[in-house]
Each structure stands twice: as structure tokens, then as C-alpha cells.
Amino acid sequence: MAYLARRLVLAVPVLFGVTLIAFLLIHLLPGDPAQVMLFGSNPTPDQISNLRNQLGLDHPLWWQYVHYIGQVLHGDLGVSYLTQNTVAHELLSRAPSTLTLTGASMLVAVLIGVPLGFLAGVRPGSLVDRAARAVSFLGVSVPYFWLALVLVLVFSVNLHLLPAIDDGTPQALILPAFSLGWGYAAILTRLIRGRVIEEYRQDYVKSARARGCSRPRILFRHAARNSIIPAVTTLGLQFGNILTGAAVTEVIFGRSGLGSFLAQSITSKNIPVVQGAVVVIGAGYILINLLVDVVVGAIDPRTRLASETA
Amino acid sequence: MTASQSRLRAWPLAVLAVLAGLVLLAAPGLIAHGDPTATTDAVLQGPSSAHWFGTDQLGRDVFGRVVHGARPVLAAGFLGVALATLAGVTLGLLGGFAPKFVSSLVMRLVDVLLALPVLLIALLVMSILGTGVISIAIAVCIAFTPGYARVISSSVRRLRSAEYVQASRVFGSGGVRTALRHLVPNLATEVVVLVSSGIGWAVLTATTLSFLGLGVQLPAPDWGSDLAAGATYLSTAWWLSTFPGLAITVTILLANFVGDYLATLLDPRGDARFRPRSLLLPGLAASRRIARRPARAGQADPRPAAPDSAAGAADTREPAASAPAGKEQP
């Protein structure tokens, strides 16, 4: 519990830093902040002066920041002046689609990467190991968006097996999830393979062998637990990259999600959305890594002890 | 012969890859003559002897566009990694060696940057600076800096108790002098490995951003935007996006290969007999000798699968373990 509290306390300044960046964005842009926020909506002078009041632009900067934090804490992330919807609504309505895609690709990554990593690590140099190494080298090197196009070419255009464009069916999720998950499967395979090899050299494995444990029992009862930790940590830290990947994948497969929406809002200079997204996604990243810390703490008591004595 | 030894024997490929990259960056006209934006009447023709990679919907030669499209991608990738190295080493030194107040401030800043995905960083940079190669390079730099800073600061913390560092302080050197004269040279190996293994990832990031329309704008050639533009014609003209994609893949493969090569070359645990004698990096011979000191034997593997993933994993979360990310065993 103390471990969790410590982690929570550490997360607070980071959260403030993220909101500070989002807040400062409108002041870093050239021009009047109110006009920047209203870009693309042909604002009337009335609208601009209203927004100036609302943002408190006549007050000192620190007052504006405190005011902004207050709004964020009430769930008010501003209004997208292109659609007149609240930013919170714009982001939340697109989140499920993106979460489904990232969840499915993580499932692909875990289902391929974890078994392959263990099989390769248990017998280094074997046929499985060589195959795993080739697969993971390719997985790290082949860009996921190109893999997506090749998969569409083969499975949709030539074989007509799976839909190329999102039509709401579960089958439409297969190609995007596979193309996005593949690279992470490769990373997991490399990580777990290296870790299993390392763990098998440890004394506790030797003593377990000496006590007459079978190889599978050593793997599942002893080595697996230690080998899985870096994989969990890495997946948490990869959250940001996965989201970026999801943006590209959404564009390719015509899915309307958070990622493709954010890419569009850069080109249309939709500043309130950019601001809101920085806060929401930054907070999401911190939350996910808090969860990862809790999970790792549960798997590995050493982490809890290390952070308490540190 | 182990995997690492066979890798070191392949040095001609590594040299060739570096040379090819330099030619594409400096003088793409040597390989593909003509203007990559010139339109002709020969639209959407498949690969032939006249147009090796076919032509696009405006009759432009895809081969020419792929050759010329390398420059923005490589420039953004190299520049981004170079800037990130500079910023990462500076922040890492501050985070590991500066007084407590400064170092904890720096490490919190690194944590904040780490919480922002590349897409959001790009969002912020592009809203302020607009789209283009420089913006992509800056986005890559900001995205890579926190990971580098973490790896460097954890190495600095390990080195800071070394006797030669203590001795330098005892003899009256200030913190800055000690850092520049004694810490930086000993970080050289690690920095080379970080940079070389980061290039592939940087190229991927740069093409991802230009795929989303945040880089060089059409009609200028660029692998990412050409790939995106060709995706519309996937069912009728497969060559439009296949060849830029292949170029990206080959580049990342070669970059990863060169990265692994340098990492093996500089690996303090590797077998010295199979290391070419400072063939590529004569200046690093000295730092390598220091790197082979037994004190560093248990260090975390400085080759992250991605700069901000394994780096963080090895740094804060599992102090008891060494993370062999992507490590090739004999």
C-alpha cells in the first residue's frame, strides 16, 4: 500500500507538467491566444472578446493557469470551434474504437510474442529459436503501415477473405490488429527470449534442477514469473507508440478513431482539441504506467522493497 | 562461430549501408536523373525497363521519387537523433551528476516528456512551427530525448562513484569540468550504441509522421507521403505504395543491422579477438578499454528495443536486474 501511495505521489508533478504544456501551447503560438483558439471558424469580434474573457487573458499568467486547472478538474476541456462540440465529447466518442484496436493488437502481440519468446529462450540455437529471431528481426524492421498495405493487398484485394475498410464487423478488426500488433510481438519475443536465457543461468534454476524439477515445471513455476516482468513494463511504456501506430492504422483502414481524428486536427489547426488531447492522453499514459507498476509490484516483491528502501 | 562473430565478419555490408545512406542524402541525382516531380502522359504504368518501379497517377517515375524521397526521411531521422543525443546527454548528466535540486527537477521534466506520445509531440510541434522536415526532426528529438536522458543518467549514477571521478573532485575539479573531462568520454560507447540503434526507429517515426501528412508536402517526393498517396490506388496500381514501403523497410533493416553491428563491436563482454582493430571508430579504442573494466560487467544492456522502452525498464523499475533487451546469446 505504501508502495502504491509513493507511486501516486510521484505521478502528481508529472500530471501538472502535462497540463502546463497544454496550457502554455496557446501562448507559444504566434498571435492572440483567443484568435488562435478560434482558427478556422471565422469568428466575430464578439466571439473573440467572449473567449478572451473566458480564458481570462487580462489576468496574469499564473491566474490563467490556476483557472485552467480548475476547468480541467471539472472535466471541461473547452470547445472545438470547428464542430461546436465540447472537446471532451469529441475525444470520448472516438475513444472506444481506438481502445478496441489497441486492445486487439496487444492481444495479438501477447499471443504471438510470449509463447515464441519462451520457446526460443528455453532452447537457444534450436530451429524454433532461429525462426523466432528471424521473425522478430523482421517484425522490428518492417513498418506496420506498410505491413498493413501488404496484408490488404493479399487478403482483401487478391483473396477477398477480409474487408479492407472498416464496416463494423469483427472481421474488419483482424487486419488492423495484426498489422499493428506484429511489431510489438517482435519486441516481446526478443525481450522474453533474452530474459529466459538469463534466468536459466541463475542459481535458483540449477537448484531446482538438482531437486529434480522437470524443465516445464521450472519454466512455469520459477523462470516465467521473472521473465514476464520486463514485458509488462515495456507494454506500458509503449502506450504512446501504440497510440501513434493506431492513428496511422486508422487512416489506412478508414476507421474513425482518436488517432486519425488527432492527425486531422493538426492539419486543420484545431487548437482546443490538441490541448485537450495532450491532457487526456498524458493522464492516460500516467494511469497506465501506474497500473503497470502495481502489476509488476504484485508479480515481483523485489520492486516493492527496492522502492521502499530507496 | 557464434552469432556475434559472424555479425562482425559482415562489416562490408555495414560500410556499404552507411555509404548508400550518405549518397542518398547528399546527391540522389547521381542515382536517378531527372526531376522527380515532372509529370508525363505515361500514367499508372507498371514496372518496366523504362520505369523500374512504374509510374504514378500523374505519370511521374516512381523510382525517381523513391530515390529522391530518401533525403527528407534520412535528414529528419539523422537530425532528430543528433539533437536528441545532445539534449539527452546534457539532461542525463544534469540528472545524474548535478546537485539534488537540479537533478530531481530534470528527472521530473523527463517524466513529463515521457508521458507524451510521439503523435502528441508532433501535434504540439506542428501547431507551433507548421509542417516540414525540421518540424519532424524536432518532434523526433523531443520524443527520443527522455529515453536517452534516462539511460545516460543511470550510467552517470553508476560512474559517479568510480575512483577516477572521486579523485578528480578531490583534486579540486568543479562539477562541470569533472563531467566533461571524465564522465563524457566514458559514456562514448553507450552514446554510439544509443545513436546507432535509434536511427532505424527514428526513420520509422519520421515516415509515420509524413504518412500522416505532417512532413514534406506534395508534390515533393517523400517516402511517407508517397506511400499514403499510393494507398488509394492499392487495388489497381500496387507498385505506387509498395516501392516506397520497401525502401522504408530496407532502410530500417540496414539501420538496425548497422546498429547491432556497432553494439557487438563495442560490447565489453564480447570476444576481443573477433573485433576488427578500430576499423570504423579509431577514437573509441580508449573508451572501449575502459568499458571492458569488470565493474561494468553487470550493467544494463544499452541496446533498447525502442529508445524509451527498455531504457526505462532497466532504469527505474527493476533495480535488481539487468535487462537483456534484444541481446544475442552465443
Image (cartoon, coloured by chain):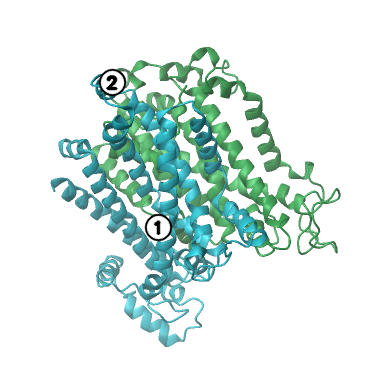
Left or right: B50 in relation to B216:
right
Residue B164's tag is: none
Colour of chain B in the rendered structure image:
green
| Residue A2: % across, % down | 13, 46
Q: Is residue A200 above or below residue B249?
A: above
Residue B245 appears anywhere in the view: yes
| Residue A43: % across, % down | 47, 83
Q: Are marks 1 and 2 in contact (CB under 8 Å)?
A: no
Residue A206's tag is: 2
Closer to us: B99 or B306 = B306
Query: Of the residues tagged 1 and 2, which is closer to the observer?
Result: 2
Residue under the point 41% across and 62% down: A100
Closer to us: A245 or A135 = A135
Q: Amino acid at mark 2?
A: Lys
Q: Is residue A243 above or below residue A207?
A: below
Q: What is the crowding at mark 1: few (fewer than 14 residues within 10 Å), some, or many (at least 20)? A: some
User: Which chain can be seen in cyan?
Assistant: A
Gap between marks 1 and 2, in whole Å? 38 Å
Q: Amino acid at mark 1?
A: Gly
Left or right: B157 in relation to B2:
left
Residue A279 lies in what quarter of the image?
bottom left
Closer to us: A99 or B277 = A99
Residue A103's tag is: 1
| Residue B74: % across, % down | 61, 45
Same chain assignment for discs 1 and 2: yes
Left or right: A306 in relation to B252:
left
Residue under the point 32% across and 44% down: B106
Quadrant assignment for the N terminus of chain B: top right
Tell me which chain the residue with mark 1 is part of: A
Q: What is the crowding at mark 2: few (fewer than 14 residues within 10 Å), some, or many (at least 20)? A: some
Residue A30 appears anywhere in the view: no
Tell me which chain the residue with mark 2 is part of: A
